[in-house]
Amino acid sequence: MSKEQLMSQEERSFQDYLGKIHGAYSSEKLSYFEHNLETWRQLWRVLEMSDIVLLITDIRHPVVNFPPALYEYVTGELGLALVLVLNKVDLAPPALVVAWKHYFHQHYPQLHVVLFTSFPRDPRTPQDPSSVLKKSRRRGRGWTRALGPEQLLRACEAITVGKVDLSSWREKIARDVAGATWGNGSGEEEEEEDGPAVLVEQQTDSAMEPTGPTQERYKDGVVTIGCVGFPNVGKSSLINGLVGRKVVSVSRTPGHTRYFQTYFLTPSVKLCDCPGLIFPSLLPRQLQVLAGIYPIAQIQEPYTAVGYLASRIPVQALLHLRHPEAEDPSAEHPWCAWDICEAWAEKRGYKTAKAARNDVYRAANSLLRLAVDGRLSLCFHPPGYSEQKGTWESHPETTELVVLQGRVGPAGDEEEEEEEELSSSCEEEGEEDRDADEEGEGDEETPTSAPGSSLAGRNPYALLGEDEC
Ligand SMILES: Nc1nc2c(ncn2[C@@H]2O[C@H](COP(=O)(O)OP(=O)(O)OP(=O)(O)O)[C@@H](O)[C@H]2O)c(=O)[nH]1
């Protein structure tokens, strides 16, 4: 088939596909999903050129980010190894992470499951609740602190056994670990001395040409690892974490990566970063919002999603909110979503421009952003988790994960936190703001402590209810 024939066939099939989906399900039921064929093409091309596919998911809601159709296609039709990366494990209790790992092993036996975080934190150290208002920034050698490269290497060694020499990758990890342990924190200087560690290939039109799934595997002794997943699950951060420094820009705005790029991690390991892509599903709207699938800027009625969040984690306690009608702050008052938004607007000083009333809509958007960013962390459980919680908590892999995270954290000079003015207005998700939204590096502002820390010493994870799944 010529390139033109194939392109037009893809176009037709895609239109058919969209037509069938929209014909079978009402728009209220269907989730927000990718309608741009170019983005799907990038996924197909990345899968075609890969020897191993990494499907990156957010540990807070991994099933939301796991399309079973992709599993079937990659492992069945393409016959490739699929590594499921449960990413951002710093945002979930270790026992829950391990329970999810086993859930996926059990339901999708061909998966290799790897745990990862670019921001490891010692789960034994109680989290300061004022960290809700803080944003972590990574600088210099901070990226070498990622937890998971070693596990990922082991999975790739098991997959490629005898076909590619991955010793250069193993040596790189050893160098990174030594650097992170013995480095003196002035990462940026060291980085410059190291010189460029990776060769970045910008993709041209020819890279977008289909190669067909029969492409030679492990061409020239190089393993190509394709990183795919929903927007905002941390694909770019994971690549930075593997490389050990920032090679890909990271943003909390979903859809930041637009074109796929390849990076040589070592001479025999090539990484390929694919733009995030949302698969269609029948997920309720509130869940789509909290999982970062539905753009917050497009929500007309944010209060139901706030209510969904607040009925699962104690938002008002975590944010030290005072009930708008409370004369006596110690008295118990029933809260509704509107009260929470009103109290948050009051606390943050959000006022409407005209009447200078509390800007409840802005407050609702702000709360949803805190949830999507993971600063108010709502995690979903695999079925049956609550009944077996004790078993998962005492599971040897949980203990291992706690020790591992503790060994990497706490953050040193390489990671800084700063209190952020929480933004929530709709225009902030506009085109021109995307670049401004990119997470910076090297910002040297002094961390500030947030007022009122009576929750200090309490772990917000422990506050999760039992019915979140
Ligand atoms: N807590 C935590 N946050 C993370 C981690 N990895 C990434 N993030 C945050 O998640 C957001 C998205 O990260 P990216 O690496 O840009 O995600 P992406 O999947 O490349 O996003 P797209 O470009 O939209 O496809 C950013 O705010 C990151 O700081 C992690 O391991 N832990």
Image: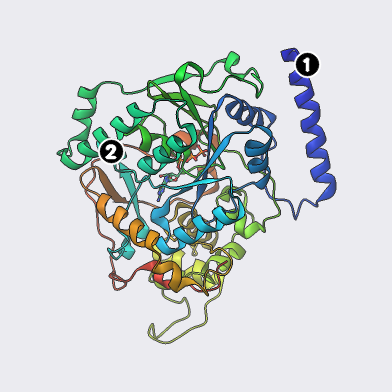
Please state if 316 lies on the left or on the right of 8 as rendered: left
Residue 139, label in figure: 2
Please state if 74 lies on the left or on the right of 402 as rendered: right
- Ligand 1 lies in quarter: top left
**Residue 55: x and y, percent?**
54, 41
**Residue 284: x and y, percent?**
67, 59
Q: Is residue 247 above or below residue 92?
A: above
Alpha carbon separation for disc pair 1 and 2: 47 Å
**Residue 40: x and y, percent?**
66, 32
Viewer-nearest residue: 77 or 451? 77
Residue 5, label in figure: 1
- The local secondary structure at tag 1 comes to helix
User: Would the CB of label 2 be found within 8 Å of ligand 1?
Assistant: no
Mark 1 or 2, nearer chain start: 1
The residue depicted at 55 percent of the width and 50 percent of the height is 292
Do the numbered discs 1 and 2 sit on residues whose CB atoms are within 8 Å? no
Q: How is the image coloured?
A: rainbow
The residue depicted at 35 percent of the width and 48 percent of the height is 119
Residue 327, label in figure: none
Quarter placement of the C terminus: bottom right
The residue depicted at 47 percent of the width and 16 percent of the height is 220
Kind of residue at badge 1: Gln
Q: Is residue 210 above or below residue 180?
A: above
Q: Is residue 306 above or below residue 299?
A: below
